Amino acid sequence: MVAEKVEKEAAGQLLDAMYLDLFHLIEEHTQCKVNLERANASGAILLARTRFQAGGSNSVSKAQIPTENSAEFNALCRVIKAKDENEINIERHAVDKANGYVEPLHWFSVLPPMSLRHAVTKFRDCIELVAESTNLQRQLTDVLISKLRQSVLQQ
Amino acid sequence: MSLLFNTEWGYLEGITRGFKNGMLKHSDYLALTQCESLEDVMMNIQSTDYGNIFSNDRKFSVELIEKRLGEKLLNEFNYIRAHSTDPLSSFLEYIRYPYMIDNVALLIAGLNNNRPMKRLLEMCHPLGYFDQLAAIEVAISSVELFNAVLIDTPLAKFIPPNFHEETFIEIDVEIVRGVLYRSYLESFYAFCEGLGGTTSNVMCKLLGFEADRRVITITVNALPTHLTAEDRLKMYPTCGNLPDLALRTLSEVSDYDRVRDVCNFAGYGDMFDNIERDTDGLIGLEDRFLMVEAKNNVQSYLQQFHYGIFYSYVKLKQLESRNIIWICECISQRQTDNVNAYIPIPLD
């Protein structure tokens, strides 16, 4: 009887710890999404500012972006699996025009203005935040599905 | 010149001053910044001198607003151009050349990415449209492109004598565009100097400022790149107030503080003061230049009987169009904190 009571208490404490983990992860995940939206919005307004300063929508234009018929090039940024199987990482390659690693900024201008450079920084941050958000999402799913369900079954 | 000016161009000066008086005032900008949607912006624009430019449109977007504003300026410019005689007609053609250069650069970039010509022509600036523009598609190699685009077009006279087909293939489109623009600016400056009188005084001041601005902007933008001093010097117009020594120094500097020192010495130090650091990179050096340019263009209306008012009108109207598009972008992206970051035009 006493042993049963102790077991139940232990299970209850475990559940409490799980729920606390869950709420912390939800908070981090939401904060990550808010930061992502902010960075994306900053990048977009900086693109609009570049057009404003350079004198028209043709300074940052669709015509400058490669299409499926353009020459092939290698991605500067890849998503790879981290050492911990459940997480992802961003791998960045250095710019190397001779080997096909082109700088996307140069599609728009070889002399890009400051606002365009700031926009590049913001969009780079967005990629990092997307990876962070994905990892948090995976951790959340992990806690929610596997561990909590197991604890409830054990109870 | 001033006694005979009115016989040929008095009507056109009068009508341009009328167009300029119809530009948006501070109160109109206030009304636009308080709009909550693009439909509100369009209704407010229609109550100004722009009139009913959106009457047949149903789908609202920033691109559509920009297109309609551009069409209004194009109609006014074409009206003035159709009624002008030489040398004003040549002067007005000079105003169009930068838009032609930009259109050619856009087409080259678009064709390199295999985009269809029809869509690219729709994206070109209407003020820079010329007959041979569509002929660019026919060229299949850079040599043919060089001949088709630059030799058989109105831009042919801006190609420097040492510019060969091989140079065109080797160097970047941006540098070709920079070299053409320098050539254009120097040619325009010489043309205005030749006209003499008030036109020469007003225009040489405006073009001198434009040349200096171009030098400083290219220098600052080239700092983080690997552009050589020689390439930078090729793009620097020499018709400004910056002396040759300053140009040579600027072509070789590699940090921002040195650029600031040279500009301080040459009288442009104010541009670099207190550039706000907390606006997330929105306000910069280019905005300072735009403010001074707006002030100079408004001041050109203080004198009469000169061609400078036509040039200033096109510049001010473009700036107004950019201000309206900026306000529209802030509203459509729901980032109205930055809506007041337009350049006010001191018309009053």
Image (cartoon, grey):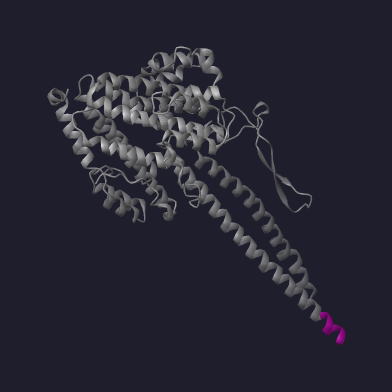
B290 horizontally vs B2: left or right? right
Q: Residue visible at 41% across and 18% down? A: B135
Question: Residue B253: percent from the left, percent from the top?
Answer: 55, 31
Q: Quadrant of residue B199?
A: top left
The correct choice, above or below, for B76 with respect to A42 in the image is above
Q: Residue visible at 35% across and 28% down? A: B207
The answer to whether residue B101 of the structure is visible from this angle is: yes
The correct choice, above or below, for B241 with respect to B157 in the image is below
Residue sitting at the far front: B265
The answer to whether residue A66 of the structure is visible from this angle is: no
The correct choice, above or below, for A89 with respect to B122 in the image is below
Q: Residue visible at 40% across and 36% down? A: A55
Residue B22 or residue B281, whichever sits in front = B281
Q: Which residues are magenta?
A: A2-7
In what quadrant of the picture does the N terminus of chain B appear?
top left
Whether residue B275 appears in magenta in the rendering, the answer is: no
Question: Residue A90: percent from the left, percent from the top?
Answer: 69, 46
Residue B103 or residue A68, whichever sits in front = B103
Q: Quadrant of residue A14?
A: bottom right
